[in-house]
Image: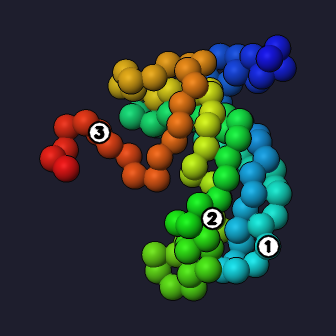
């Protein structure tokens, strides 16, 4: 756990971070593990250090798509569990260090379902 705590230090707040991700460059081609740069969160955004992830049916569907709404390159694996690394302004629901489960479709809590 100490290694994870070091990576979550607030020294990254406001700065881009480097991490590894499984990137889909083209429809249907194998995912490639690459180092990527993740920008600091903007207002209302949360940057999460993903601890575990998987690919679901939605990921596979988008991975195979050749036309819009498919967009490449793409990072798959929204079914995940992670730890909040940093938060943007006006984020009140979570804080740095919180364990979270990202979802494909965000909910603001104010919109009518």
Earlier residue among tags 1 and 2: 1
Quadrant assignment, res 39: top right
Residue at 79 percent across and 47 percent down: it is 20
The x and y percentages for residue 47 are: 57, 35
Q: Are marks 3 and 2 in contact (CB under 8 Å)?
A: no
User: In this orientation, does residue 108 appear?
Assistant: yes
Q: Kindly report the distance in space between the C-alpha atoms of the residues bearing marks 3 and 2.
A: 24 Å
Q: Which residue is denoted by mark 1 in the rendering?
A: 30
Residue at 75 percent across and 52 percent down: it is 21
The x and y percentages for residue 1 are: 80, 17
The x and y percentages for residue 79 are: 57, 49
Q: Which residue is denoted by mark 3 in the rendering?
A: 108
Earlier residue among tags 3 and 2: 2
Left or right of 24: which side holds 109?
Answer: left
30 vs 110: above or below = below
Residue at 51 percent across and 85 percent down: it is 67
Quadrant assignment, res 71: bottom right
Quadrant assignment, res 27: bottom right
Q: Which residue is denoted by mark 2 in the rendering?
A: 74
Residue at 61 percent across and 37 percent down: it is 81
Left or right of 110: which side holds 8?
Answer: right
Circle nearer the viewer, 1 or 2: 1
Earlier residue among tags 3 and 1: 1
The x and y percentages for residue 33 are: 82, 57
């Amino acid at each position: 756990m100490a290694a994870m705590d070091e990576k979550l230090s607030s020294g990254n707040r406001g700065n881009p971070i480097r991490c590894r991700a499984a990137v889909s460059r083209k429809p249907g081609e194998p995912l490639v593990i690459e180092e990527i740069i993740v920008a600091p969160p903007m207002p209302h955004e949360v940057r999460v250090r993903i601890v575990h992830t998987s690919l679901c049916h939605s990921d596979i569907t988008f991975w195979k798509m050749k036309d819009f709404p498919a967009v490449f390159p793409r990072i798959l694996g929204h079914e995940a569990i992670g730890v909040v690394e940093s938060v943007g302004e006006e984020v009140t629901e979570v804080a740095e260090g919180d364990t979270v489960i990202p979802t494909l479709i965000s909910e603001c809590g104010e919109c009518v379902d």
